[in-house]
Image (spheres, grey):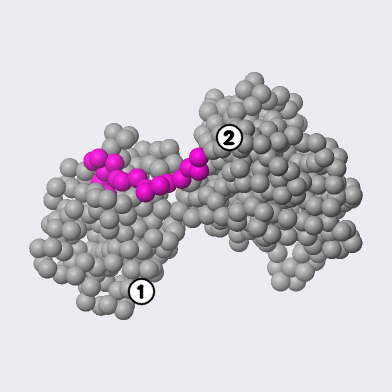
Amino acid sequence: MILTGAEVLAEGLIRMGVRVVTGYPGSPATGVMEAYKRLAEGKDDYVGKWMINEKVSLEYALGHSLAGQRSATVLKNVGFNLIMDSLIISALTGVRAACLIILGDDPGARQSSHEEDARALAVAAEVPLLEPATPGSSPEVLRRGIDISERYGVPVVIRFTPTFVEEREEVHLAAALNPSPAPCRSSEEITGFTCEPHQAIPLHARLHKIMDDLSEEAVLSRWEGSGSAGVIAVGDSWLKVRKVLVGMGQEGIKVLRLEEVNPLPTKALLEFLTGLQKVLVVEEVLPLVEEKVVAFCYRHHLDVEVVGKVSGHLPREDVLLLGDICRGVAEITSREVAQEVWDQLREEKGGWGEGKPLCPGCPYGKILESLNRYWSKRGITTPVLAGEPGCGARMYYPPYQKLDLFLCMGSSVPLISAVASCFPTERPVAVIGESAFLNSGVPALIQACRLRACILVIIVNNYSAALTGYQPTLELGRDELEECLQRVVQGAGPAYFASVSEEGLEGLDVVISKAHRVEGPSVILVNAPCPEIK
């Protein structure tokens, strides 16, 4: 069966009895959830559900795990930031049935607001971290993750990048696993999962013992070849390393395909490094494994030169290109690379380029036009405008080019509330999509209302997470979503609130004028579907 990486992960979750999968939309992780939902359709005992944000998503999955049902949550790199509190505590309190965090990282920020390496957060949380090298190896990685999670009682992170998601490969799917070993018969059995101050140190010691024990195992990591030069291909960077070595030849090179990243498999790593003079660590984005291997060699008195991103043999930012890896391998092996090999490995560096403008008919554009008319007619200085991830990011580009502040979900309202306190005669604006608002913006609006900040918040309800594939917000119908948003906003207690339909956008100028007449925060909810889903 030929499948993409995303499809293999979804098939593996189904076959291995992971009955509850939650998530929040975001590329490159979205495809895993969508594939799982398709497979789960019609199966009474399996459910895939989009949640309000990543933290709630993980906690809902954890609840099922504690009740004895295998579960997983699917999220992307920036969403991983939001789960840290819950992840760190759950690693200490433990889980019952397997609980997996399926993490889509985004080197190069091709589908994200910024580039980060979420593996560093998994290491900080002191949880096991696995990275499948290929779609074909991911069923075995999933099986290993479930085994670790249930044998040791810890959540396990399984990380991949767009390279993995897009790869298509012949896959032999693993046989189904038995259901989780200890399903609860009643909620009375769900007890003992706490971390009180007097428990914190013993639980931390327990977690360290688990990680030490795992480091002695080497179930997934494999190496091949011989010679005095070596390459460690971390996770799905193996897909690129494999292409490079096919072009250059592997003669005189030992290659380790590393799928166990935290903790590192010490025995396998020691065996691989013994006899090497130089080793190139290929990974994206941070030199996480590179620095760990440097420390490992020092502790074990191995005279091996470890190179990679820190040493300058590979670029420290953006996705790794085949040419980057080829240069690194050539340097550690002192090889001359034929021009025909360079030509074969040449590839274009993709990216956002100049960015995409708002689509024709997008409600964000009509909102900006109304704001510009209001400011222009009154001859007032254009105030600060803050946006959030989603379609609002495209306000930065022509023809509108109006986006002054743009950090992360939930940040726009606190930012402009602070600006309003510094410039009380102005009314700064936040424009936020309904998905981002429900994800992280609700607490921010409650705080702004409590502060009586003189701000204008415009929530654009286009009924979907448009940039990630038009997933329905909270999987609610349109009327239900409108009612939910209206009740949440009114419950926060703004000084002024108005709800505007798509047809009412023509009269938005009047609503904006009314919103400026009150003292305190004004909120306008614009219910207008994305033109792509009408």
Residue 259 rendering spot, x and y as whole percentages? 74, 43
Look at the image and give the residue range highlighted in magenta.
Answer: 348-364
Q: Is residue 256 left or right of residue 35?
A: right
User: Which residue is at a point 27% across and 77% down the rendered structure image?
Assistant: 423
Q: Nearer the viewer, residue 296 or 183?
A: 296
Q: State which mark lies toward you, 2 or 1.
A: 2
Res 219 visible: no
User: Which residue is at a point 21% across and 76% down the rendered structure image?
Assistant: 425
Q: Quadrant of residue 288?
A: bottom right
Q: Residue furthest left?
A: 377
Q: Nearer the viewer, residue 276 or 195?
A: 276
Res 316 visible: yes
Q: What is the three-letter code of the residue carrying label 1?
A: Ala
Local SS, label 2: helix
State the predominant SS element of the stretch in magenta: loop
Total labels: the figure holds: 2
Task: Please name the residue that numbered disc 2 is placed on.
Answer: 343
Task: Please name the residue that numbered disc 1 is placed on.
Answer: 418
Q: What is the three-letter code of the residue carrying label 2?
A: Asp
State which quarter of the image contains the C terminus. Answer: top left
Local SS, label 1: helix
User: Which residue is at a point 23% across and 73% down the rendered structure image?
Assistant: 426
